[in-house]
Structures are given as structure tokens and as C-alpha cells.
Image (cartoon, rainbow, N blue to C red):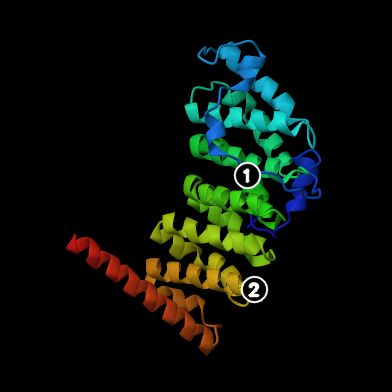
Amino acid sequence: DSRKGNYNPSQYSDEAMNGYNNRSRLADAELDDSELFNEDPWKAILGFSCSEHDESTDNDVITTILTELSNHNKRNNERKDAMLSLIKMTREGNFNFWDEHFKTILFVLLETLGDTNGHIRALALRVLREILKNQPSRFKDYTELTILRILEAHKDSEREVVRSAEECADTLANYLPPETCVRILNPIISTANYPVSLAAIKMQNKVLELLPKDTLEAQMAEIIPGLLRGYDDQQSTVRKSAVFCLVAIYLKVGEGIWNHLTKLNYSKVKLLNLYIKRAQQSSSGTSASSLDT
């Protein structure tokens, strides 16, 4: 299958990202959500009232925002204001130039994930998350690139960035087509190292919840080998997440999973069965509680 391959994020550096750089990391302050409700600074700069809205204003504003965001590794306060404005425009849903500007917006934000300022990197992920929630269909041609960059962000040295990357990965799993996500995640889980492998398995777990049973059954041969690799990982968090993902598959497809687990040793089978029973008991308890109420 020509779509399959190893996890190799460097292939996107020159072709799609026009020189994406991994730079040193610096810490910065946390984002205050209340800032998102401030007056849009860019309309003020351009001389427009924040209550005004027309297409020419939108086009001028987004052009100014993109110009500012191109100032990588400098003018941090101005770039922060630009990204807050972009979040606000996305949430309001009245921006009319996605067709014209989406690709540029996406690539600038993905390149910003290599910025030297940790707070700027985290904020870029929050903008991406907001666009994913409001314009998910526009990622159709960029799904693999976006997933790879967001998973790579889990390697960041700043906890704020990692937390934003985790939230963004959750949004990816919920808003992008699950069949596409599974196809992209399989080779990453099979070849990537911690912490990217952990992030990919966690995302896969959420995606499998949305995958139809018949599709999951048809793809188990591609999904399970990477999870078995994770089950053998040196990192306990990776092993545990792989087990949880196998449990999720069992709960959806049933006993058919064992046909793909013949190479598991006795202790691993026993542990998996233990987690399966716990999950079943938890599910039964939840069902009983809902019936009581």
C-alpha cells in the first residue's frame, strides 16, 4: 500500500514548511483566557471600529495578522495579539476569506511551533485547535502534516506547550475523519519513539472510539502490531496506553482480537485480560447507575 510508511517528519521540512526549524526553547507566561475577549487590536490599528464588519475589513485584518506572524522569534507581544485576534475571528464565525488564506494561516502557525518563545509556541497550538473546531473540513489536504507537527510538539521542553499539544491532539481525534487518522497514526505508533509514540497511542485510543466496528475489524491487522510494540516499550506510560488501546478494541470487536494477539506471552495476556475485566465492570456499573437514575 503506497500510503503506508515510516514516521519521518523531516520529509515535510523543505517541501511543505519552507524551512521549518527546531530551535531552542524559552519559557514565558501562561495565556489568560480573558484576553480573548479584549477589543481586536488589529482593527484598531487599521482604523476600523470593532463593531464594523465587511469583507474588505476582513481581508485587511488577516493580511496584517499574517504579516505580523511572519516575524518569527521577534515582536512577541505583537504576535501574541495577532494570534488572539485570529482566535476571536475564528470563534465568531464571520471571517469570509478561509478559501483564500487557510493554507497560509496553517503553514505560518505550523512554522511558529519552532519559535524560540515557549508561550508563542503554545499559543500557536491554541489557534490551530480553534481552527480545527470551527473549520475541520479545510484540513483535508493537510491532515498528515498537521497530525505529525502536533505530535512532534509533545517533545517540547515547556510543559505549557506539551499541554496545548495534548489538547490539540484531542481535538484532532474528535474533528477529523477517524479512518484517515487511523491510517496516519498506524506507522507513527509502529516506528516513533517516546514521547511521540505515547501521544500517537493516546490519540489512536480516542479515534478508535469513533471508528465504526466493521472498519475497525477490517483494519486490526494494521492497527495492532504498533500497539504490541508499545506494549513492550521501556516507558511504563507507553505500555499502559497501549494496553488501554487494546482494551478499547476488545470492547468494540470482542473475541476476534485474540486472533491478532497470538504472540503475546502469558503474563501479558493475563494483564490484558485483567484490564478488560475492569473495563467491563466499570461499563456495567455505569450502565446500572444510568438505569437507577
Mark 2, other Cα within 10 Å: few <14 / some 14–19 / many ≥20: some
- Please state the horizontal and vertical placement of residue 28, each as a whole percent of the image: 71, 45
The three-letter code of the residue at mark 2 reads Gln
- Please state the horizontal and vertical placement of residue 71, each as a whole percent of the image: 78, 31
- Please state the horizontal and vertical placement of residue 170, each as a whole percent of the image: 52, 51
- Please state the horizontal and vertical placement of residue 290, each as a whole percent of the image: 23, 61
Residue 103 visible, this orientation = no
In-front residue for pair 172/119: 119
Q: Secondary structure at mark 1?
A: loop
Indicate left or right for 288 with 198 as reference.
left
Q: Which residue is mark 1?
A: 30
Residue drawn at the location 64% of the way across and 50% of the way down: 160
The three-letter code of the residue at mark 1 reads Glu
Res. 79 image quadrant: top right
| Tag shown at residue 238 | none
Residue drawn at the location 68% of the way across and 58% of the way down: 5
Residue drawn at the location 57% of the way across and 70% of the way down: 227
- Mark 1 in CB contact with mark 2 (< 8 angstroms): no
Q: CA distance from mark 1 to mark 2?
A: 29 Å
Residue drawn at the location 64% of the way across and 20% of the way down: 42
Residue 192 visible, this orientation = yes
Vertically, is 94 above or below 206? above
In-front residue for pair 283/246: 283
| Tag shown at residue 235 | 2
State the quadrant of the N terminus.
Answer: bottom right
Vertically, is 119 above or below 195? above
